[in-house]
Structure formats: C-alpha cells, structure tokens
Amino acid sequence: MKNKSLAIIIVCILVLTSCIPTNNIEELAIITARGVDRIEDNRVETVLNVARFDPQTQNIFATVSGTGNTVKGAREDAGNRLNYELKEGQIDVELYGNEAAKQGIFPYIGGLIRDARVSDTMKLVISNTTAKEILEFELEQGIAIGEYLADLIEIEVDEGALPSSTLQDFTRRGATIGQDAALTLIDIKEDKPSIVGMAVLQDDRYVLEISTHEGFLLNLFLNQIRNTPIELTLPLEPFQEYIEKIGTTERERDERETFSIQLTGEHGNSKTKVKNLEELKFQTDIYLDLEIAEISQPISIKDKKASDLLEKEMEKKIQQQFEELLKKTQEVNADPFGFGKIYRANKEDGRITPEEWREKYPNINVEFNVNVKLMHTGTVQ
Amino acid sequence: MEINVKTRKNLQIRAFYLFFIVTSLQLGVGIIGAPKLIYLEALQDAWISILIAFIYIIVVIAVMFIILNQYENADIYGIQVDIFGTFLGKLLGTIYILHFAISFFSILITYIEIIRVYMFPAISNIAIGFLLLSLVVYSVLGGFRVMVGVCTLFFIFSHWIVFLLVHPFTQMDITHLQPMFVSSFPELLSGAKTTSYTFMGFEILLLVYPFIQNKKKARFPAFLAISWTTFLVLLTTIIVIGYFSYQQIARREWVLLGLFKIQNLTFIERFDYIVVAQWMMIILPNLIFLMWGITFGMKRMYQIRQKTTLYVSAVIFLVASIFFDKHFVIQNLIDFSARYGFWLVYVYPFVLLPLVLLKKYRRNKKAGESHEK
C-alpha cells in the first residue's frame, strides 16, 4: 500500500511538470529596457534592450526595434527580428521619447498595469530626445543601457536628490485627483546619457522641464530627505566681513557677487496646511537640518552671528526657489506638489473634479516658510 | 435522523481551535477584492462600514450560540429537522450543502484565475484544479482532527504576509482618507453589505459545534476570530485606500495583490509571485472545511458514506472548473454566492432563533405537564 501511494506521487510529480509551459533560458531574451517613440501615422516604435544567454554570442545584451499600432504590437514586430522569445518580467526602465511624452503616456502605461507579470517597480523615464537615440547609445565596457539608467536613477533617489519615478509612483500620483506626476528626465549630455532634471506632467502629458535642483525641492516637498547633497548659490555681499585671508598675501579681490555652498541635508521634511480654503491660501513649512561640506569662498563661520546670517540667507534663497518653481508649474497648470489633494482633503464634502482643480490651481497662493538649521560646519569653522 | 450528533471523544477538539477554524474560513479569496468593493460604496469611510459589519457579525454569532446551546450536542442539520420536520428540515439542510458547494467552487475557480493571470497564463484549469482537489481530498480523508491541524498550521505559516504590508503602509498618503465622515448612512450600510462575501465562513460554527469538547469556553475564540479577521480586513482596506488613488482602486481587479508588487529584496525581486503561491495556504483550509461540510451533511441527512460524497463531489468540481474560465462568468458566480449567502448566513439565524426558543418553551411545558400528571 505504501509503495503504491509512493508510486502515485512520483508519477504525479513527473507528469505535472508538463502542465506549465517550459522556458529554456537559452531561448529567451529578457527585456531590460524598453523605449517608446511616436512616429508618423500615429504608429509606435519601440526599442528593446534585451539580455540573452546564448553561449555563442560575445555580448549578452542587444538592442532591437519594431513598429506597430500598440506597444505590444510593436514588441511583436521587434520579436520577429530576433530569434529568441521576448519576456517582459524584468523590465528595469521604460523610456518615452520626447514626442511620445508630449502627446501623453497613459496609452502605453495601460498595458503595463493590465499585465500582472510586469514588475511595478520599473522606472519610467522621459527622454529629451528620442528613446531610440538613448537606448541605442553604445556604452563602453558593454554595460546594458537599461541597467545603467536604472542605477543612475536609483542612486539619486536613494540619496533623496530626486523623487522616485517608478511605475507605481507614477500611477499613484498621476491618478490622484489634484496631483500630477513628475518623472525623471534624461538626455545625452557630454556624450553620455545622464539625468538632466525632472519632467513635470499634466495628467499624462510632458509639459515642463525642471532642473535637478528643482527636482530636489519637489522631493523635499513630497517626501522626507536624509543625507542628501544640496548645492546653493548665495550672494556674497552680506558675508564680506567673514571672508578670510589666506596666508599673508593679499589675494586679488574676487569680483564675483555670488558664492556656492555645498551642503549635506541631514534631515528635511515639510508640512503643508490650508490657511484659507475660499481664497486658496496654503502654508508650507519646510524644515532642513544642514551640514556644510564645502564653500567656494573662504568664508569663516566663526560665531553664532555668522551662522545665523548664513541660515537666513539660505532660507531666503530656498524660499525664493520654491516660489519660482510654483510659479513655473502654475504657468503650465500642472500640480506636482499635490496642493489639489490637500485642498480636497480639507474640503467639507471632500469632492473635487480634476477639471475644477485645473481652474483653481493657477490662482492658489502658497506661503513657503523655510526653517534652516545649520547643525555642523565640518571639522573647520 | 438523530437530532444530536454523537461524536467520539477522540474526534473532539479543544475550544480554542475554533479560533483557527473560523479565521481560516473567513480569510480566503474575498479579502483580495474586498477593499475595492467596500471603497466603491463608502469611499474613504470604508473603515466605518467594516466596523458596522463587525458589530453585526458579533450579533449573528451570539444568536448562533444561543441556538446551539438550546440543544445538547446538535448541528444545524439536526436543528432544522427538529424545528421544521423531516421534509422541510432536510430541504433547508440541502440548501446549506448547496451553499457550501457554491462557496467552495467560487473559491476554487477564483484562485485558479489568479494563478493564471499572475503566473501561468497557459496552464489548464484542470491541472491546478486537480492539484488543489487532491490536497483537499487527502486532508478530508484524514478526519476532523487532521483538518483542524491543517487550519492551525496554515494559519501560522501564512500570516507572515502581513509583514509585507509594512512597505506600502509607510508610503501611504494620508490625504486619501480625508475628509472623514462624508459618506451617508445608507452608503455606509451598503458598504457593510459588500463585506458579506469576505466575512462569510463563520457559519461553519453551526457544524463544528458538536465537536468541541469544552463548549462553555467556545464563545471567546469565536469572537476573537471575528475580531482578528475584521482587523485584517480593516488594515488592508486602509492601506489600499491610502496607497492607491481612487481611479486605481476602481480599475484594479485584485487590489490587495497590487500591494505586494513593490517590495523588493536583493534575492527576491517579485514578492507578488510568492504571495500568490502562498495564498494557497490561505484558501486550502477554506476548501477543506467546506468540502467536509458537504460530505458531513450528506451523511447526516441522507446516510451517504462520507467517502462516496467526497470522491463524487471532487470529480464534479473538477469537471465544472473546466467550464468556468472566463473572468465575468466567475464574477457572476461570486456575486450569486454573495447575494443569497447573505440571506442564509446573516439573516436566517434571526428567523431560526425565535422558532428554536418557542420549541424549547413548548417542550419544557410539556415535560412540566407530564411531570405534574
């Protein structure tokens, strides 16, 4: 009896494996990055960066492209040019060309969410040129471009320098009423694909380019930061008396009116509340604990007075930058901060349509209160 | 037929296992989709709906206990025959069996569909169905105590999934839950009603009660079980609402599984695969106990051997699962199960209670009269 049931189990194990379609790794091409471009006649061109494990080829990475009416259709077309079966489970980066992004990216994203086998942690990136140009870029040492881009973004996001831009983040922010998403922006700079800032979207259309520093401000607004490098440029004028002489030689007086200061943001967070619902008045308090890493001028922060002055100047600067960023987004009527959602949460019935918020957003008034605390100055004063 | 169930001492269980039985039966495929359904009815006040449902279920369970305590050692099949007579009682018992069968089947095919969508789109229903059903048959053949053991162990083995929710929890957007208290009372009630399919399963109490050794202590684990499931449903609903935006919840099918797509470790990149596979441990106790309910009912009312019912119904379920492979057909079955299950599980005990009390009152009176003579 025991042998009999054992035999049944063994037979089952042997037979059941055939229920699931087999995937031989030598026959697969795993897509690591995908680019989407819009070409004429409303057609889509996708560029796929694939990894395949064929012992006969030198480089395991390859790039193929195809065209079609939908993203999946274009993928099939690309698949026809490759003697491997394409698998989508491991896409790290999805890249949208400039044209495609300006016309809206929801149509391409629908397929990603619908397909449960696609990873939700893939990064969505917008290219300032075409996606093809970036994905076909030849990197030295044969690194896969998809992995390269993903790492590039990952490091910035881990540092807190930029808000994260995964598929989840995009669908969450973009679909929340009263908030728009912002995605990482990539361009070829100095002959290498690099992050040039963030692309602010209105619904799903790319409408505004902001710099990496503004991306940091956005992240400070949306999330908490920790150990983030920050660079600020401040006017030199108020610090005249603290400029140090080095050695005995009188240096040539610097004609520049500003100086740069490199800081580490130890902690940073923000709080936003509605001050007046009818008049659309908001108040945002931003708290930053900073540590000086480098100053481009030999300014000595020797006493509390100097430190207070520096704090005040930095507060003024950051506040001004926030106000500029808000104004820019109001001009294109895209709300990456999510003031609309805060508005909705404080409204009595909690209901607002996206259209209503679009009407209101250009008229909102935000008071940014920046509180900077200079914690340390490093090992020198 | 006998009103009271004669249970052998070696088949009985201690009262606290009731906790595992009831939670295991309540948690199933329902909770995967429940946050969405409640949210669509009651919006950000969905949590109030869940609490309303919780209070209602406590009342239902209290009523069930009162009914069961009027008898020495009876289950629902026996009680119905006692109250309504042989024919009507057996008819109602058959309805219960059908209820278990449809619940069983809806869980089976929903899980098969989830596997097909998330992992193996090409696998045939019959292959997964066969695997699951063979496990069910095997456990039911093991007897009542084995089934309880499976419940207990799988409860412990599967609850680590809760810890995976920490990540989405930290990324919640609290404004999604604001402003509070905007949904009207009818909206909250209809939200509470949509939880009926998710919370269903505690009716097994009416069947397993005779198997409990120390019946006096049975109330506490039963209420604890309800509290635990309510807590889990509440937690997942709040995280889902906080994490996803309105449109996402409205459009996603299994919104809870979407929460498991963001966790990421260096050696495991996709936790959703693991969670979907792990979910088998959550649905298996469901299937086992529902199957047992069917076989036990057939034995009690029609004196059919449990093994016969077990094999026959397993084959029927397996064959039927081939025909239920379309999404909307499955959804219709779930809706059907939820709709009439609502009346059977949530309303019927209140009808039964006065009848049982009346019967007891009369019986006592009769006994008193005969005593006087």
Image (cartoon, rainbow, N blue to C red):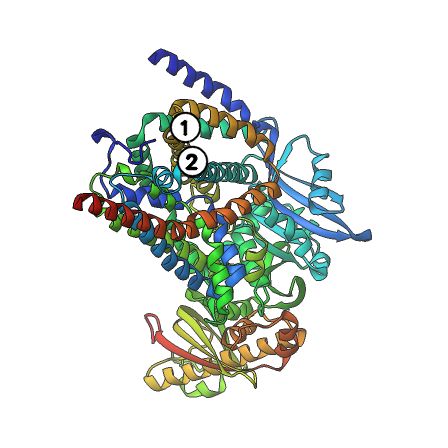
Check disc 1 and give the amino acid type.
Tyr
**Which quarter of the rendered picture does the C terminus of chain B lie within?**
top left
Q: Is residue A72 left or right of residue B225?
A: right
**Which mark is drawn over residue B90?**
2
- Tell me if I can see residue B340 in this picture: yes
Q: Is residue A372 left or right of residue A172?
A: left
Return the x and y of residue A189 as percentages of the image width and height. 63, 58
Q: State how far apart marks 2 and 1 are (Cα).
A: 9 Å
Q: Is residue A286 left or right of residue B141?
A: right
Callouts 2 and 1 close, C-beta under 8 Å: yes
Q: Count of labels shown?
A: 2
In the rendered image of this protein, does residue B253 appear above or below residue A274? above
Secondary element at tag 2: helix
Label 1 sits on residue = B302
Chain letter of disc 2 in the image: B
**Which quarter of the rendered picture does the N terminus of chain B lie within?**
top left
Identify the residue at image location x=43%, y=67%: A224
Q: Is residue B198 left or right of residue A72?
A: left
Chain letter of disc 1 in the image: B
Return the x and y of residue B253 as percentages of the image width and height. 56, 49
Identify the residue at image location x=61%, y=41%: B329
Return the x and y of residue A242 as percentages of the image width and height. 40, 84
Q: Nearer the viewer, residue B88 or A3?
A: B88
Quarter holding residue A365: bottom right
| Mark sitting earlier along the chain (2/1) | 2
Q: Nearer the viewer, residue B220 or B119?
A: B220
Q: Nearer the viewer, residue A44 or B284?
A: B284
Secondary element at tag 1: helix
**Which mark is drawn over residue A4?**
none
Q: Nearer the viewer, residue A103 or A150?
A: A103
